Image (cartoon, helix red, strand yellow):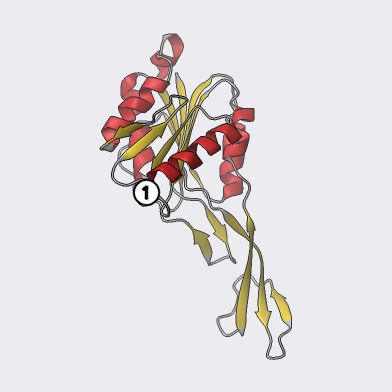
Amino acid sequence: MKCLVTAGPTYEPLDEVRRLTNFSTGRLATDLATFLPGQGHDVILLVGYYAVYHGDPKARIVETFTTTADLRARLQALSSPDVGAVFHAAAVSDFIFAGVWEQTAGGELVRRAERKIPTRSGRLLAELKPAPKVIGELRTWFPQACLVGWKYELDGDRSGVIRVAREQMAKNRATACVVNGAAYGEGFGLVTAADLPEHFADAPSLYQALARLVPPATGAAAGTSRG
């Protein structure tokens, strides 16, 4: 079965030398992209430019993405009914820069648009606007696929992050959602349509559960994968 995995962070440019990004090593999903070929699946890995973990991915294709727009374009280009599963673990930026403004001594805001904004400028104000939600388009691009999202939350508690995961699934017509972070606690949760989410103490156990969501690899799909 053809599987698509996204890993690591996007970034958004402030100017041509400064960028806004997320703390994400890309390790969890990159290792998933190494595990799935061993189960007979044909894997495409999209990994963020600033992911610091590279491992030894066994994916047939590995591509690097940069901005949210770049990741979106790569996913859309891969749209196909042949994709049986999409594991969307990339740490996509919630915001992009709408503009950078210098505040003069008189309080006036002057837009700065240099390729490299001078460090000697006065007080600078960066305007942020919401980034497009890539996960909201995945069901359109991959209508038949098993679609798994991720929720990494720091505030709140386990019941709260599970509730947010169910909301994400309903809004984006996802099959499942992996939850982790300080709000969830140690390990990982896998939220599906079942009444109770599954808990896993470590990543290898999570990978086994995610693989069970994917139809068995048969025929041509199994023959094209690499272990």
Residue 178 as seen in the image, left or right of residue 134: left
Q: Residue at x 51, y 51 (%)?
A: 10
Q: Residue at x 40, y 14 (%)?
A: 217
Q: Residues within 10 Å of mark 1 (few under 14, many from 20)?
A: some
Can residue 179 be seen by looking at this rendering?
yes
Residue 207 as seen in the image, left or right of residue 169: left
Indicate the position of residue 137 as horizontal and vertical percent values. 62, 35
Above or below 30: residue 182:
below
Q: Nearer the viewer, residue 171 or 77?
A: 171
Above or below 16: residue 37:
above
Q: Nearer the viewer, residue 159 or 63?
A: 159
Res 117 → quadrant: bottom right
Q: Nearer the viewer, residue 196 or 169?
A: 196
Indicate the position of residue 198 as horizontal and vertical percent values. 35, 30
Q: Nearer the viewer, residue 41 or 183?
A: 183
- Placement of the C terminus among the 4 image quadrants: top left
Element under disc 1:
loop
State the residue lying farthest toward the top: 219
- Placement of the N terminus among the 4 image quadrants: top left
Kind of residue at disc 1:
Gly
**Where does label 1 land, which residue?**
181
Can residue 89 be seen by looking at this rendering?
no
State the residue lying farthest toward the bottom: 105
Above or below 103: residue 194:
above
Residue 195 as seen in the image, left or right of residue 135: left
Indicate the position of residue 43 as horizontal and vertical percent values. 42, 27
Q: Residue at x 37, y 20 (%)?
A: 212
